[in-house]
Amino acid sequence: MEQVFDLLITVFLVVGGIFGLVGSFGLIKLDDPMSRLHAPTKATTLGVGGVLIASMVHAYAHEGHLSWHELLITLFLFLTAPITANFIAKAHIHRHETPDTLPPAGEDKTWATHDVPPEEPGSGRG
Amino acid sequence: MIEYAVYFAATCFGLAFLMNLWKIATAEGVGDRVLALDTMVINAIALMILYGLANGTEIFFEAAMIIAMLGFVSTVAYARFMLRGNIIE
């Protein structure tokens, strides 16, 4: 049984390390800012998730208790990675693109971040 | 077997860390730098977890959790600053 757990830990560590390396390599390799967003937010998050799961299995197999800290960190990273990606993409769209340079938005009139509702007088914002 | 796997993963994440540093030094825009910093925080978390795994301590999980939260908040603050020019309006 020990062997099986060791194999599991090794596989998770190796896969996580490769994912982390690919994520950061994509950050310097890809040439478009929007495609550059994909590599770190997806591959690196998966890589660190693999390392955290390996750590969890290690705590269970070698110290005999299941530790929930790692699952908490994994969950937190998996929840926050899309939010940071969305924020950075939004900042890029507002700083470097206009509605004309973006691809068509499908059935909507324009992309949501450019779709500003008309200002109401006396609404207190401004 | 685990020892070598930990070394392999630490090498991968260390290389990834160096790539992030390189990207921060050579990026042409602010957005790329913020993205590279965010990736660097995640790689730092992975390195801390690997160090804790190699030494059999659990003290680093709390530190990793705090770094994860601070990394998220700081990335959001940077993005707000890029968009609006200030952070808390």
Image (cartoon, rainbow, N blue to C red):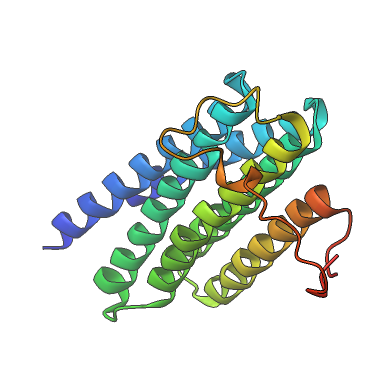
A121 and A101: which is toward the camera: A121
Residue shown at 50%/27% (left/top)?
A: A104
On screen, residue A74 versus residue A102, left or right, reads left
Q: Is residue B87 above or below residue A35?
A: below
Q: If the image is split into quadrants, where does the C terminus of chain A sit?
A: bottom right
In the figure, is residue A123 to the left or right of A20? Answer: right
> Which residue corresponds to the image point at 34% horizontal and 58% vertical from the top-left?
A54
Where does the image place residue B27, in percent across and percent down from the top left? 77, 27
- In the rendered view of the protein, which quadrant contains the N terminus of chain A? bottom left
Residue A86 position, x and y percent, is: 57, 49
Q: In which image quadrant can residue A99 be found?
A: top right
Tell which of A26 and A108 is nearer to you.
Answer: A108
Q: Nearer the viewer, residue B38 or A102?
A: A102
State the residue lying farthest toward the bottom.
A65
Q: How many marks?
A: 0
Residue, far right: B85
Horizontally, residue A62 falls left or right of residue B41, namely left
Q: Position of residue A41 (x, y in %)?
A: 52, 44
The outermost residue toward the front is A121
Give me the residue at 57% from left, 58% from top: B45
- Asked if residue B1 can be seen in this view, the reply is no
Q: Is residue B33 visible in the rendered structure shown here?
A: yes
The answer to which image quadrant residue A74 occupies is bottom left
Residue occupying image coordinates x 48% and y 67% = A76
